[in-house]
């Protein structure tokens, strides 16, 4: 592959087949993302993207040509390429009917967890209120019955 890379330092239009151009583009992107490409070249092409003057083939050729030969042996490059490959393989699995089913199951789990958390919180608050009423009754002789009777007499006089 290194021989191919060295031979492809020409302009993008002179490159061969579409699959080779795609490989070069992906490799250049991986080199920039992993920090192995020449920083000045990467910055210049990032500015070109922002400015609207991006040429994918020319960018790939320049990034690859300016990257040191040792960079192609980097474990970081291979690891990132493997993660991208995995993500692309699973992309179709993450869409469509299967993905909708997964989203429904996830939403159901989230809804169930929300419901259970609220029930537990309600029970804890109720237990704390009952404990406070118990302490008020035993320690101070105060009963909630009198409060309830006064509320009832206000609402329904007579």
Image (cartoon, rainbow, N blue to C red):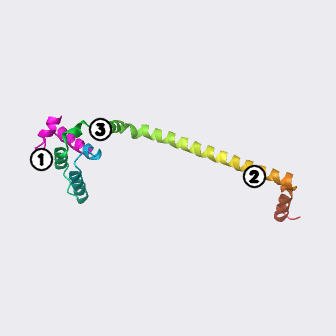
Above or below, 72 relative to 52: above
Above or below, 74 relative to 122: above
Mark 1 surroundings within 10 Å by alpha-carbon count, few (fewer than 14), some (14 through 19), many (20 or more): few
Residue at 62 percent of width and 45 percent of height: 117
Magenta-drawn segment = 1-29
Residue at 29 percent of width and 38 percent of height: 81
Mark 2 surroundings within 10 Å by alpha-carbon count, few (fewer than 14), some (14 through 19), many (20 or more): few
Asked if the magenta segment contains residue 15, the reply would be: yes
Q: Is residue 33 visible?
A: yes
Sequence-wise, the earlier of marks 3 and 2 is: 3
Mark 3 lies on a secondary structure that is helix
Mark number displayed over residue 70: none
Q: Is residue 16 visible?
A: no
Image quarter of the C terminus? bottom right
Q: Nearer the viewer, residue 123 or 41?
A: 41
Within the image, what quadrant is residue 149 found in? bottom right
Mark 1 lies on a secondary structure that is loop
In the drawing, does residue 22 fall left or right of residue 126? left
Where does label 1 land, which residue?
A: 11
Mark 2 lies on a secondary structure that is helix
Q: Nearer the viewer, residue 90 or 26?
A: 26
Q: Main secondary structure of the magenta part?
A: helix
Disc 3 to disc 2, C-alpha distance? 58 Å
> Where residue 31 appears, x then y in whole percent?
25, 44
Within the image, what quadrant is residue 1 found in? top left
Where does label 2 land, which residue?
A: 129
Sequence-wise, the earlier of marks 2 and 1 is: 1
Sequence-wise, the earlier of marks 3 and 1 is: 1
Above or below, 147 relative to 138: below
Where does label 3 land, which residue?
A: 81
Q: Nearer the viewer, residue 99 or 120?
A: 120
């Amino acid at each position: 592959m290194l021989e191919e890379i060295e031979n492809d330092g020409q302009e993008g239009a002179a490159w061969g087949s579409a699959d080779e151009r795609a490989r070069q583009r992906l490799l250049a992107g991986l080199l920039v993302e992993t920090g192995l490409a020449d920083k000045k070249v990467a910055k210049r092409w990032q500015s070109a993207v922002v400015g609207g003057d991006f040429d994918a083939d020319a960018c790939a050729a320049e990034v690859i040509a300016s990257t040191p030969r040792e960079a192609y042996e980097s474990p970081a490059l291979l690891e990132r390429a493997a993660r991208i490959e995995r993500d692309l393989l699973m992309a179709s699995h993450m869409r469509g009917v299967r993905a909708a089913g997964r989203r429904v199951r996830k939403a159901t789990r989230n809804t169930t967890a929300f419901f259970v958390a609220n029930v537990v919180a309600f029970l804890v608050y109720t237990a704390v209120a009952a404990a406070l009423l118990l302490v008020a009754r035993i320690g101070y002789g105060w009963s909630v019955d009198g409060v309830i009777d006064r509320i009832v007499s206000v609402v329904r006089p007579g």
